[in-house]
Image (cartoon, rainbow, N blue to C red):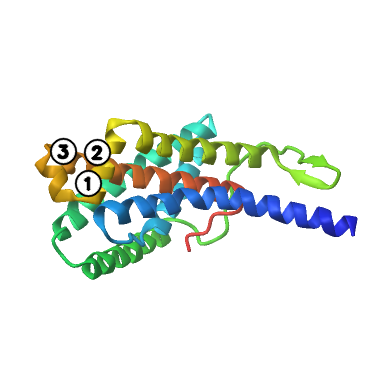
């Protein structure tokens, strides 16, 4: 019975850690849905791009993994901003289904490019080997603690921004009524750019953290 209890606690702990990571792309998806009014299904592929950029930077000899993470976040911000600027901005007046199909096409394209560029063998980040902390059978890796703290900090930062800053208030105004926001001298364009950068950053961070906990595969 004690063994079952420990097994259950370990499972619950793993579930909590992965849930915290998945919350990042889920938030990214929700933000785009709130402002651009369509679900951008390329979120998973943006995560994968972020994960592989971090791996490439680490393999190229970036001294600290946190710098590889920052590099991945920046690349995915640029990528997301580019997809908005060259694809979704032109479809702003189109029905939701058109935008959804465009994001499906984009996801396939990103995946195809990745499959050309990276190995289809499972890969992992190079971390120093450390022992898991053991609390009466409940095991926690130090890296898992970092993963949870990083995800929590990112989520709190975004929620804080939406709750307490002018940018957040203006974004909420656009989500409620774009035309009304424009009438009250809010510039939706700049805020939409900011939002797509945020989408890229959250997706990349989610991808890197998820891969840090498991393995990288281009699928």
- Which quadrant would residue 99 be assigned to in this image? bottom left
For the residue carrying disc 1, how many other residues have a C-alpha within 10 Å: few (<14), some (14-19), or many (20+)?
many
Q: Is residue 46 above or below residue 201?
A: below
Q: Are marks 2 and 1 in contact (CB under 8 Å)?
A: yes
Find numbered disc 2 in the image and state the secondary structure of the residue it sits on.
helix
Point out residue 171 in the picture as x, y percentages from the top left corner. Answer: 27, 42
Q: Which residue is mark 1?
A: 174
C-alpha distance separating marks 2 and 1:
6 Å
Q: Which residue is mark 3?
A: 186
Q: Are marks 3 and 1 in contact (CB under 8 Å)?
A: yes
Q: Is residue 104 above or below residue 201?
A: below
Q: Is residue 206 above or below residue 164?
A: below
Q: Are marks 3 and 2 in contact (CB under 8 Å)?
A: yes
Identify the residue at horizontal 47%, vertical 41% (top origin): 155
Is residue 113 left or right of 171 when viewed as pictured?
right
Identify the residue at horizontal 58%, vertical 45% (top origin): 125
For the residue carrying disc 3, how many other residues have a C-alpha within 10 Å: few (<14), some (14-19), or many (20+)?
some
């Amino acid at each position: 019975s004690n063994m079952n209890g420990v097994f259950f606690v370990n499972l619950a702990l793993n579930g909590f850690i992965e849930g915290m990571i998945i919350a990042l792309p889920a938030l990214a998806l929700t933000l785009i849905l709130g402002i651009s009014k369509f679900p951008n299904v390329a979120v998973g592929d943006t995560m994968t791009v972020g994960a592989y950029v971090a791996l490439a930077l680490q393999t190229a000899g970036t001294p600290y993994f946190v710098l590889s993470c920052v590099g991945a976040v920046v690349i995915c911000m640029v990528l997301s901003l580019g997809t908005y600027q060259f694809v979704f901005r032109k479809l702003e007046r189109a029905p939701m289904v058109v935008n959804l199909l465009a994001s499906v096409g984009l996801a396939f394209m990103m995946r195809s490019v990745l499959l050309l560029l990276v190995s289809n063998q499972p890969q992992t980040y190079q971390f120093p080997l450390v022992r898991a902390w053991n609390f009466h059978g409940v095991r926690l890796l130090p890296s898992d603690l970092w993963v949870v703290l990083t995800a929590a900090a990112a989520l709190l930062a975004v929620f804080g921004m939406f709750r307490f800053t002018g940018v957040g208030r203006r974004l909420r105004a656009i989500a409620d009524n774009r035309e009304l926001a424009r009438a009250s001298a809010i510039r939706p364009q700049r805020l939409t750019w900011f939002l797509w950068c945020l989408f890229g950053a959250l997706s990349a961070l989610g991808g890197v953290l998820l891969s840090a906990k498991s393995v990288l595969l281009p699928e």
